[in-house]
């Protein structure tokens, strides 16, 4: 299968190195130097590409996905921070008839963690003595805060039935790949759930798994679809 990479930073290079393990051959890569405003996504240049993985920037995603839709190339989006444009991008993908997997975090463990967060919201939502928080830690170069994963976990707790405020906080320090904690605190006890990524390869592997799953499908999907998970 032919893979196009959008973004060739640390994540893009990890995806490139792991791609052969998932049956992909690299058709090429584009970044801000050779693809400003999606100018590198031209008709005829990427004939035969089966799927694209985008680990670029939030602004680039907004330009890249419509261009990929025009070329009929399905996309896996691993970048965060563009969600304000999601409704429009979903419309573009639907009209073009392509498949898109978009997720704030491609770690299999995080996808399972989201399901646990929803279940925790269901169990603890009725326990009025508990308060809740979400805290996330990332490396200093991560721009968006709170992270997309933290927002996803908050939404999962609320979806489970939690109707009270959830405090959100972020830490940016050093080289932390990503740590997320959900906490529930009562007068005499505390319950916490934590996911820790040891390195960024988990995100690259998840994106490649999604890219292998996506061709031939139409619609807007998440990693829960890719892993075949249903609501708890």
Image (tube, rainbow, N blue to C red):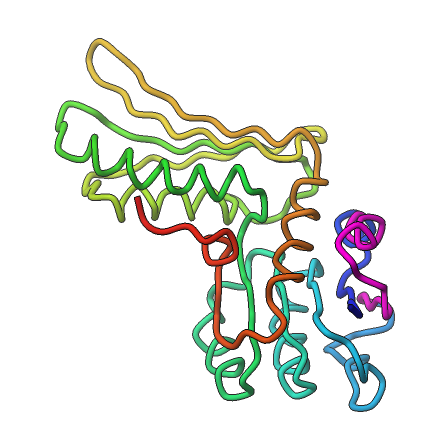
> In which quadrant of the rendered view does residue 34 lie?
bottom right
Vertical order, 188 against 87 (above or below): above
Instruction: Give the residue displayed 78% in from the left and 54% down from the top.
Output: 12
43 left or right of 103? right
* Image-based side of 219 in relation to 130, left or right: right
Please say whether residue 20 is one of the residues in the magenta stretch: yes
For image coordinates 80% across by 67% down, the residue present is 32
Asked if 130 appears above or below 145 in the picture, the reply is above
Nearest to the observer: residue 177 or residue 50: 50
The picture places residue 150, in percent across and down from the top left corner, at 46, 42
Residue 180 x %, y %: 50, 32
The percent coordinates of residue 52 (x first, y second) are 71, 69
Identify the image quadrant of residue 123.
Answer: top left
Boundaries of the magenta span: 14-32
- The quadrant of the rendering that contains the N terminus is bottom right
Q: Is residue 109 magenta?
A: no
- Compared with residue 120, is residue 67 higher up or lower down, i.e. above or below? below
* Quarter of the image where the C terminus is located: top left
């Amino acid at each position: 299968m032919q893979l196009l990479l959008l973004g060739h930073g640390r994540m893009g290079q990890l995806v490139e190195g792991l791609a052969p393990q998932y049956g992909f051959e690299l058709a090429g890569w584009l970044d801000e130097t050779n693809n400003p405003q999606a100018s590198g996504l031209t008709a005829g240049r990427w004939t035969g590409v089966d799927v694209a993985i985008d680990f670029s920037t939030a602004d680039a995603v907004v330009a890249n996905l419509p261009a990929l839709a025009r070329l009929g190339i399905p996309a896996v989006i691993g970048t965060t921070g563009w969600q304000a444009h999601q409704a429009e991008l979903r419309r573009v993908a639907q009209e073009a008839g392509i498949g898109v997997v978009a997720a704030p975090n491609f770690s299999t463990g995080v996808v399972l963690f989201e399901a646990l967060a929803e279940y925790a919201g269901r169990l603890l939502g009725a326990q009025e003595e508990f308060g809740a928080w979400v805290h996330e830690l990332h490396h200093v170069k991560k721009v968006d805060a709170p992270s997309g994963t933290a927002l996803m976990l908050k939404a999962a707790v609320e979806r489970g039935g939690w109707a009270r405020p959830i405090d959100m906080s972020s830490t940016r320090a050093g080289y932390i790949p990503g740590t997320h904690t959900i906490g529930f605190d009562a007068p005499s006890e505390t319950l916490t759930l934590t996911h820790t990524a040891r390195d960024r390869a988990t995100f690259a592997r998840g994106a490649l798994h999604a890219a292998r799953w996506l061709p031939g499908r139409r619609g807007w999907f998440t990693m829960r679809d890719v892993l075949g998970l249903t609501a708890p």
